[in-house]
Amino acid sequence: MIGAAARVLIPSAIAFAFGIALAPLLAHYLYKFKAWKKKSGKGAGVGGGGTPIFDSLHREREISTPRMGGILIWVATLVTALGLLVLSTFVGGVFTQLNFIDRSQTWLPLAALVVGALVGFIDDVLEVREGKGGLRLRTRLLIVGLMGLFAAWWFYAKLDVSSLGIPFGGQIDLHVFFIPFFVLVTLAVYAGGTIDGIDGLSGGVFAIIFMVYAGIAFVQGQITLAAFAATVAGAILAFLWFNIPPARFYMSETGSMALTLALAIVAFSADALGEGVGVLMLPVIAFPLFITVVTTLLQVFWKKFSGHKLFRVAPIHHHFEALGWPPYKVTMRYWVLTLILGVVGLSLALLGAGR
């Protein structure tokens, strides 16, 4: 018999170890097939114009560093999850306790991880082969919206969930409006995936966020959900080992789409299902993703109505680069900020749920 903490931490350690072992092989093939952009720069920005400042900051690295490093994250997570499931089925014993795949807590976030990974992989392959930006943004948004819609329906119809936890205030029932709210949150979290743009930045931020939600789920007694979130965090840390400056490869869409879809569903799963506060803590715990979306939107609207930019370049982490901050300074300050706000969010979530 192993303790609840071990059931969460051991799969995380396995995912990290497997990721570390897989990374050299992945890097070998990414470099062999020259899986990087053929032309530097983002081309048209969100507002429809060019991105000359971003292009000047990242010109050389974008055409020499492979994309698709996110493969490491979701493969390490899936191998860990499926490996423990197989061992649980055929060996039993301690592996039965370590298996964290179950219908009520982890089927949906695992499915979201896989869907996001595959769609993101297609986008990356098109980007590398054709150099035309991959899947169109509206196509990706449609897929994310449909995944959010399916997950919302599953929560509402299958799990009988239509409410949200309110800090220090119980729950608020959204009734059928829970479904569009779920879709909106999923799209917003996905939009935060554009934080992937500086060596080590997204890896450190996502690892902390998933570990915080693992902590919330653990305290609420959602052990398999906590194990899933911790396993993803362990896989991200393996990716981060090879993504710190100078990065061996970038996460790109196959990683960011997988992680953001999974994160949105983990946040909802750690909410009413665990009689806790998970979703409304997202702007605190995932503040770097939140501010990424907000500053991008502000840039677009400010330029449209005033004719001038609010930031030198958006999202704001690239604005700091444009001001002259070294990329490693931006990255490490984001890590510190995410860690501090993660602790604050965790505390508020637990206190707000009366724990």
Image: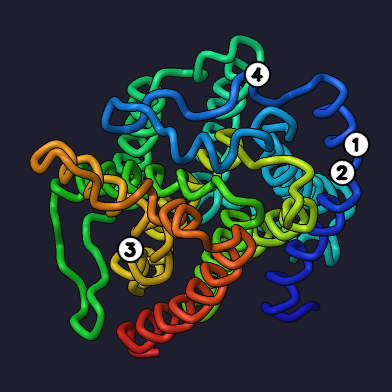
Amino acid bearing label 3: Val
* Label 2 vs label 4, nearer the camera: 4
**Picture quadrant of residue 345:** bottom left
Judge whether 281 appears above or below 202 on screen: below
The mark nearer the N terminus, 4 or 1, is 1
Residues at circles 2 and 3 in contact by the CB criterion of under 8 Å: no
Residue that carries the numbered disc 4 in the rendered image? 38
**In the image, which is nearer the foreground, mark 1 or mark 3?**
1
Position of residue 223 relative to residue 344, above or below, is: above
Circles 4, 1 touching at the beta carbon (< 8 Å): no
Q: Which mark is residue 279?
A: 3
Nearer the observer, 141 or 172? 141
Neighbour class for label 4 at 10 Å: few (<14), some, many (≥20)? Answer: some
Q: Which mark, residue 22? A: 2
Q: Is residue 312 left or right of residue 211?
A: left
**Pointer 1 residue:** 25
Q: Is residue 157 above or below residue 325?
A: above
Image depth: mark 4 or mark 1 in front: 4
Q: CA distance from mark 4 to mark 1?
A: 22 Å
Badge 1: few (under 14), some or many (20 or more) residues near its Cα, within 10 Å? Answer: few
Q: Position of residue 258 (x, y in %)?
A: 55, 40
Q: Measure how far apart labels 1 and 3 are at the Cα level.
A: 37 Å
**Within-10-Å neighbours for mark 2: few <14, some 14–19, many 20+:** some
Cα distance in 3D space between marks 2 and 4: 26 Å
- Which numbered disc, 4 or 3, marks the residue that appears first in the sequence? 4
SS label for mark 4:
loop
Please say if the residues under marks 4 and 3 sit with CB atoms less than 8 Å apart. no
